[in-house]
Image (cartoon, helix red, strand yellow):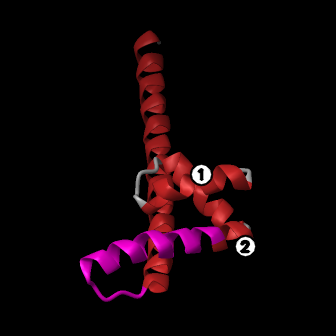
Amino acid sequence: MKCTQFEKMIPDFIQKKMDFVTLESFCRHADSCENCKEELTIQFLVTEGMQRLEEGEAFDLQREMDLRMEQAWKTVNRNNQCLKIGTLFEFAAVAAVTVALVWILW
């Protein structure tokens, strides 16, 4: 992913509007590119900070940003696990159908 693509995706990340595939590539890029990680942090602090100031709430935005990334990785990992389990079930179903067909045709 190019850095310009990453920067365009930051608002969707902040608003939690990313699909799984996009979220995974976004997280991987954020972890590997210091400049983009810094840009994400700045945009998050500005966006969330302005909203919190308007609401009059106390906040620790750096901690919230870290938690948001941690939650994003948990989502990516959970979805990857579900995909693996789904694939396993698909193989089991194909194997069962194959065994049934072989048994019937013999």
Q: Residue at x 48, y 18 (%)?
A: 102
Q: Is residue 51 magenta?
A: yes
Q: Is residue 83 magenta?
A: no
Q: Quadrant of residue 28?
A: bottom right
Element marked by disc 1: helix
Q: Residue at x 46, y 47 (%)?
A: 19
* Residue 63 x %, y %: 46, 85
The residue beneath circle 1 is 8
Q: Residue at x 40, y 22 (%)?
A: 100
Q: Nearer the viewer, mark 1 or mark 2?
A: 1
Q: Which residue type carries mark 2?
A: Glu
Range of the magenta residues? Answer: 39-60
Q: Is residue 25 above or below residue 95?
A: below
Give residue 34's mark: 2
Q: Is residue 45 above or below residue 91?
A: below
Q: Is residue 63 above or below residue 4?
A: below
Q: Which residue type carries mark 1?
A: Lys
Q: Main secondary structure of the magenta part?
A: helix
Left or right placement of residue 17 versus residue 91 in this view: left
Q: Residue furthest top?
A: 105
Q: Residues within 10 Å of mark 1 (few under 14, many from 20)?
A: few
Element marked by disc 2: helix
Which tag, 1 or 2, sits closer to the chain's start? 1
* Residue 55 x %, y %: 25, 77
Residue 25 makes an appearance in the image: no
Residue 6 makes an appearance in the image: yes
